[in-house]
Amino acid sequence: MKLLIIEDEKALSDSMIAYLKGEQYLCETAYDFASAQEKLDLYHYDCILLDITLPGGNGLKLLDELIANNQRDGVIIISARNSLDDKIHGLQSGADDYLAKPFHLAELGARIESVIRRRTFGGSNLLVLGDLTIDLLAKTANVNGKELLLTPKEYALLLFLAANKNKLVSKNAIAMHILGDGAEWLSQFDLVYTHIKNLKKKLAQAGCADYIQSRYGMGYKLRIP
Amino acid sequence: MKLLQRTVRSYLIYSLLLMLVAIPAFYFITQALCLQDVDDALQDRKKQLENLLKTHQEILDKLPWHNINGEILISPPVKLSAFTSIPAPEYTTVNETAEPFRELHTYLTVNHTTYPVILRISLIGIEDLIQGIVITVGLIMALILAGLLWINRQQSKRLWQPFYQALEQLEQFRLNKKPALRFAQTNIREFEDLHRAITQITDRTYQTYLQQKEFTENAAHELQTPLATLQAKLELFMQEETLSSQQVGLLQALSEAVHRMIKLNKGLLLLAKIENTQFWETTPIRLPLVIKRLLDPLKNSIAPKGLTLKEHYEASDIIANPILVDILVANLLNNAILYAPSRGNITISVCSNALEITNSGDPLPFGEEKLFLRFQKGSHREAAQGNGLGLAIVKQICDTCHYTLSYQYADGHHFKINFSG
């Protein structure tokens, strides 16, 4: 899987590469409008992370060019502008997703995986992680064929951890992810802990190995051997 | 008191006082002048009588005393000693059965005999005349006064028109709206100066406001990328397999600080966004559903605090923007949970276009007028968890959407929002 990270802030770009490395991703970078344009002309990518404010031009113009050339690469807009207009314009002109800065790397990982999965036609709808199988189409999970009865929030939590498997996902990242857009203004308190506890209990009851590990009280990790 | 009333009132008081003094004065002066006239006439008549008696002395012999036309009364002669002088003539006004007379009491000496004589002229015609004149003059004065007042009023109204227009424009001036002041053409210099001064001052105020607003927005925007970098680096650091407990402590503190900073920045950006967006699309929204959806993740913080939640919903739809309503309700709920004491109460009620959220917290440690200001926080320990923007955001949304937001303290904090304005 090839990714292109178009982001002028080198430190942020490096962090994204460091986080995504180790997955099956091959990351390339572009730090300004011109080099991004050149790379987009020459190669195809499975997913493009596109910053809107770039030295030398507006990232949305690159998106328009991609659409005009009928290049069907997946595009996730990453913007510091955080404005609804950019989001609407970006999604209308053919971007697959929109992520406002500052974001959690775990959230980025989940979004990339989701975009790539949607674009890989004919790919399997089943995500197999050890004993655990997640049916992405039916939105269900089962352990060795035994279905888990998960609430929508627990399913979202499991999928989020799965998308970032073997990585530490911070509590804040989880809270932001499962609360969704409208509820981001709520104070989260012990929300994450409760959901994790319930999920772990259900997994254990189904006879699943203890994949979800708490790490130093900072976050959780779905460790798949 | 209005400016016009003030000037007119002074005129009116002056005119009324003048009329009160002038009309009686005019009456007495006219009366005095008329009496003077009558007295002169009596004097003339006395002279005529004297001449008549000198030439026709026989008149006196025929009658012991004479009453001619009831106007001249000659009494029998009186003996005056040589040493007494003849008394001076005397004028008096007498009233006989509703008819006033002017009388001249005097003495006539004919052939060394002195007769007391009374001459009189009826005043009835003169009284009527004086009354007529006074009434006419009074009427004319009243008419002049009324006319002057009316003309003055009309003219003042017209003259002050630009002033009132300017005042109205100023009242409509809002700091967050570009001033579009339009003044009527006037050829009066003072008003031209006033209009110019107002235009300058509103333009300058608006520019200053814009600059400040832009600064806040730009600062918040510019912080997004460094914050993103900071957060990303921290998350990478967390991926390290072997961390000492000291490192974990540092990481947690750092990550909490960054998280708060991000929320604060988001709050500031949201405030700017709400303020800058003129039209928010609206749809019918069922408030109880919104509240239930947002309460769900909050249950985890309501239970440990031992809070009692009372809910009372009446089914009614409001027309509003769903994003803003979410933010509004979430912030009010957060606030209620944050400021309710342990084992306290929270009441949520929805009835006909209004939402009321109450928490049984202690009274405000600061003035009510500061409640909705940015970065205003309560004094208790938990208040530090808030970012101080929640209620400012609530206020901004209510202002933008013309909802009425009210607060009162009565055994707890009562926040009420009326969505129908």
Image: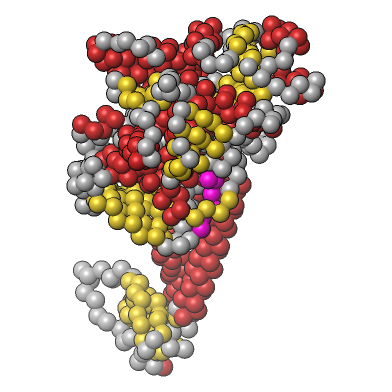
**Residue B193: image location, x then y, percent:** 58, 28
Examine the rendering and report whether any part of residue B34 can be seen.
yes
Q: Quadrant of residue B119?
A: bottom left
The residue sitting at 27% across, 82% down in the picture is B78
Residue placed most toward the observer, A184 or B352? A184
- The outermost residue toward the right is A69
**Residue B401: image location, x then y, percent:** 52, 45
- Magenta stretch in the rendered image: B317-323
Q: Is residue B238 above or below residue B337?
A: above
Residue B322 drawn in magenta: yes
Residue B382 drawn in magenta: no
Residue placed most toward the observer, B67 or B395? B395
**Residue B241: image location, x then y, percent:** 35, 12
Question: Looking at the figure, which quarter contains the N terminus of chain A?
Answer: top right
The residue sitting at 64% across, 20% down in the picture is A47
The residue sitting at 42% across, 21% down in the picture is A225
Residue placed most toward the observer, B15 or A222? A222
**Residue B124: image location, x then y, percent:** 46, 80
Left/right placement of residue B359 relative to residue B292 reads left
Q: Is residue B386 above or below residue A202?
A: above
Left/right placement of residue B409 relative to residue B71 reads left
